[in-house]
Amino acid sequence: MTHLHITTWVVALILFFVANSLFKSGKEKPFKIVHMTLRLFYLLIIASGIQLLLGLGAITGEYIGKVILGIYVIGMMEMILVRGKKGKPTRIFWIQFVIALIVVILLGLRLPLGLKLF
């Protein structure tokens, strides 16, 4: 199950950067398609994350923090794309996205279900 969750995150990040580049190059219709596909992957990420969480013996504060930060990262991805589409500034959201993503990845690697890199 962990592999499904990681795969959905990786695909979602790829789709996010593809959608962002499509928007910046002015390709409205492909942007819309990729953006809607990305939204589907948000749901898959949340569903696989909930399934992982429910499979744990004991849910600690670190897992709860990772869930909250993971949902925050999804929110920042969506805010960047939507605000960019509306022509509003997105710099602060990019900063928050990068910081939250790094923390989520490090937490995911540190926790017992993650890969044993540390």
Image (cartoon, grey):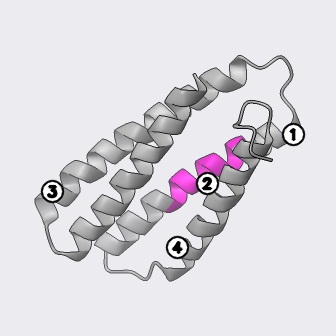
Q: Is residue 101 magenta?
A: no
State which tag comes first along the sequence, 1 or 3.
Answer: 3
Give the x, y percent position of residue 76.
52, 61
The disc, 2 or 3, on the residue closer to the chain's N-terminal end is 3
Name the secondary structure under disc 1.
helix
Q: Main secondary structure of the magenta part?
A: helix
**Which residue is identified by label 3?**
30
Magenta-drawn stretch contains 70? yes
Q: Secondary structure at mark 2?
A: helix
Q: Dot 3 lies on which element?
A: helix
Q: Which mark is residue 61?
A: 1
- Viewer-side label of 2, 4: 4
Q: Which residues are magenta?
A: 67-76
Percent position (x, y) of residue 102?
A: 66, 60
Vertical placement of 86 versus 2: above or below?
A: below
The amino acid on which the numbered mark 1 sits, given as a three-letter code, is: Gly
Residue 104 in the image, given as x and y percentages of width and height: 68, 52
Q: Nearer the viewer, residue 2 or 34?
A: 2
Label 4 residue SS: helix
Residue displayed at 78% across by 39% down: 64
Quarter of the image containing the N terminus?
top right
Q: CA distance from mark 4 to mark 1?
A: 26 Å
Above or below for 34 versus 112: below
Q: Which mark is residue 94?
A: 4
The label nearer to you, 2 versus 3, is 3
Q: Position of residue 92 (x, y in %)?
A: 56, 79
In primary-sequence order, the first of circles 1 and 2 is 1
